[in-house]
Amino acid sequence: MRSFFSLLVPSILTGIAVGLGAIVFLWLIETILHLFYGSGNFAATIRELPEWRRVLTPAVGGFFVGLLVMILKRTDIAGEGVPQVLEAVVHNRSRMKLLVAPLKILTTAITLGSGGSAGKEGPIVQIGSTLGATVGSWMKRNEHDRKILLAAGAAAGIAGVFNAPIARVIFSVELITRRFNINQILTVTIAAIIANVFTRYSGVKALSIPLTVIPSTDWQTLALSVPLGLIAGGLAIIFGFSLYLFTVLFHHYKVPAFVPTTLGGFMVGCIGLFIPYIHEPMMMPLITEMLSLNNLSILFIASVLFAKILATGLTLGSGSSGGVFAPALLIGTLLGALYATFVALFGFGDATITTTFILIGMASFFAGITHAPITAIVILVELTKEPMVLPAVAIGTFIAYITAKTIHKDSVYTEHVNRNVGYFKLK
């Protein structure tokens, strides 16, 4: 416990810093979103805009992100965020530059506010980790302590976006420290709680997944979760390959950094012209609609699913900034709904089983792309507030994780670290 008490003050400072950073981060995203698209309901507003503006707005956002990278010569403010944290742990003794935090806030806010297809979670992990590692460096802590504070910052960052107290701790331990040590868990928990208090009392609304139907947990559902897990694991490999492919294609040549980000944004805008659900503000409305069991065609569901995979690959592969968790939730939702539709052809379709498959799809797909099955299961249960779904979700999630891990050893997070895949070839 002596180690814990020595980290008590740094963990409190980390929680305060990350909580304030999360408030600024979320506020800036909303501000830039209103600047580009106006106030009011995004789904209604975007359909009223002229086509040229819908296509060019993500391109303009990509241009400014690339311009920042080029001027500042900082490739660590591009992309997902979590790989950069792992890079710091593996290759830089858990040291991170403080400047990364405000710049990552800005590049992510521009990407998401201009209509990029990504999420907030990866960047807020990098922002929080940067602040935690900086607190450790300022207080002259050793590498071991800096690593714990880095993980505490990551958990505090997640706490700023989600109201998922257990999942945020498990995420940091499962993906960053990789050790279940009581001192580490206590330090991480304190920072996360403090950050969560700051964001909740500031009026930030926590992400939640509303359920209108209690999920099914009978033996048929448990059995049918196995093939869904296999499919989710396979689709996770396709998603990861698309990220890797677009990163390699966009950054193969030495060109100004704004060229790939602008091109990627333009292509996302073209997709969004036909399927606006790829834009980040459209994610939760569509998930809510699908959980409300509104009748949507197979063609619509399949089209949005593959468009979302493509748009996310273009956004992150081109070098714009954002996370994969939000896209994973939507892709998993669409996969589960599609699976439920086909299962219904064999007489297994009802409201409870459709809801269950959607939830299994979410957790399974996320576990497949991140190789973090425990985090995926816990965060879904916490976001839905429905523990009854745990058995079916656990089966599908571990099947997806095993499938994806067997086919390809790297997750979307470790791919960049282990294969040395970088953003931009800056002149």
Image (tube, rainbow, N blue to C red):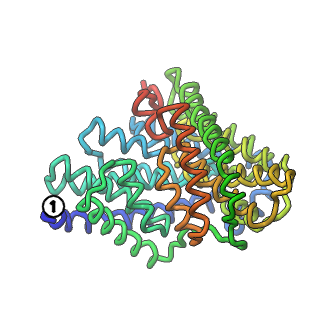
Residue at figure coordinates x 62%, y 54% from the top left: 362
Q: Nearer the viewer, residue 389 or 262?
A: 389
Q: Amino acid at mark 1?
A: Ser
Query: Residue 403 in the image: x percent, y percent?
Result: 57, 38
Q: Is residue 398 above or below residue 3?
A: above
Q: Position of residue 263 (x, y in %)?
A: 63, 34
Q: Which residue is mark 1?
A: 3
> How dense is the environment of label 1, judged by Cα within 10 Å: few (below 14), some, or many (20 and up)?
few
- State the image coordinates of residue 221 (x, y, percent, origin top left): 70, 58
Q: Residue at x 77, y 48 (%)?
A: 275
Let me know if residue 117 appears in the view.
Answer: yes
Q: Quarter of the image containing the C terminus?
A: top left
Is residue 100 depicted above or below 285 in this figure?
above
Q: Identify which residue, 68 or 425, lies in the foreground.
A: 425
- Dividing the picture into quadrants, the one containing residue 212 is bottom right
- Most extreme residue toward the front is 219
- When asked about the image quadrant of residue 166, the answer is bottom left
Label total for image: 1
Does dot 1 land on a helix, a strand or a loop?
A: helix
* The N terminus sits in image quarter: bottom left
